[in-house]
Amino acid sequence: MEVIKTYLDNVFAGFAQTEQVRTLKTEMLGSMEEKYHALIDEGKSEHEAAYSVIADFGSIDEIVAELGLEAKQAETKETTDDSLFLTREQAKAYISQTKKSGFFIGLGVWIILCGVAAFLLSNLLPLFIAIALAMPLLIVNGLKIEQYDIYEKKVIRLDAATQMEMKQRRAKFIKRFAIQISCYVALILLAVGLFLWGNIPFGLELMLVMIGFAIFLIVPIGMQFSVYDILLNVGDYANKGQSSKYARIIGTFAAIYWPIVAAGYLLWSFLAGAWHISWIIWPVSGAIFGAIAGGLATWGYLSE
């Protein structure tokens, strides 16, 4: 029931709190509670019943037009050019595509790392085969996600029911996200530990395969976590309109920075045969990039 009450609070928050509005809100709450309990009696879960009631609520615009309610004149920093309205179907399509693309992108990374491991055991052929298999996965799914880049730059507007659903999904997802990400990071640490202190045959190759598998698991949930933040304009996406210029700067910097890092890693590894230690480039480069990107984003936010 708290879901329905919160939903109505959000719906009527944009209207002057006149006696007419308060009476209408009370009547609607009573009607929705009655339907909610009827659905519970039919065997539906609390979540299913609450969402069904909200979904059947209809458009608030029809009630506003019928009763002539007046909306508050609220000041906002966002202009229509900085915002984008999404339907429930569009939001769900975005989530679905991100989950699918995240799976295949993670798979592509794992295939490449398996190819590197196979190269260390034999020759370059397995590596080239792995790259040939992985690149279509990375490119195709990267392009599929790229079509949604605008969502990261504009303030997303959702109807009240969809926004409530996304908040509930995010809250439910976060509960298992922390556990999953901890397990996957533990897997990476285990892989590094086995390589450094395990004294087992093919330790380096095993480490690469294990880290690749952990990345394969991390990428989809990491991308899904970002989706909810983007749709709800929270977390790193709470100031989209303010930081868009600096986000483009960071994006341009990343497009130059990471290929240079990758080239340096491969040159060091191949020419010096330093596969046992060259992996350190990635965490160090990640820390440097994070510091630079964070500094640019903070500078952009404070300078607005």
Image (cartoon, rainbow, N blue to C red):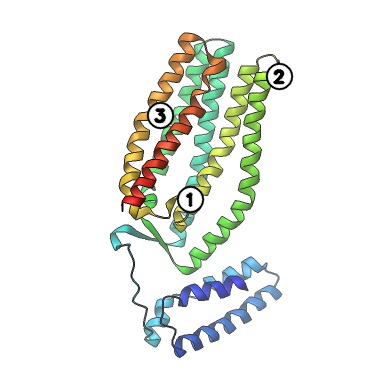
- Foreground pick, 124 / 151: 151
Residue under numbered circle 3: 258
Q: Look at the image and tell me in which quarter the N terminus lies.
A: bottom right
For disc 3, the neighbor class at 10 Å (few under 14, some 14 to 19, many from 20) is some
- Identity of the amino acid at label 1? Val
Identify which residue is drawn at 54% across, 20% down. 115
Q: Which residue is mark 2?
A: 198
Residue displayed at 50% across by 88% down: 23
Circles 3 and 2 in contact, beta carbons < 8 Å: no
The residue tagged with tag 1: helix, strand or loop? helix
Q: Give residue 35's position: percent from left, percent from top.
A: 61, 79
Residue type (three-letter) at the residue carrying disc 2? Gly
Q: Tell which circle, 3 or 2, labels the residue nearer the N-terminal end.
A: 2
Task: Tell me if label 1 and label 3 are in contact, CB under 8 Å.
Answer: no
Determine crowd level at label 2: few under 14, some 14-19, many 20+ residues with C-alpha closer than 10 A.
Answer: few
SS for dot 3: helix
Q: Quadrant of residue 186?
A: top right
Is residue 56 visible in this depiction of the protein? Answer: no
Image point (63%, 36%), residue name:
184
What is the distance, in whole Å, between disc 2 and disc 1 at their CAs?
39 Å
Percent coordinates x, y for residue 147 in the rendering: 37, 46
- The local crowd at label 1, few if under 14, some if 14 to 19, many if 20 or more residues have their Cα within 10 Å, is many
> Which circle marks residue 227 in the picture?
1
Determine the residue positioned at 64% across, 21% down: 206
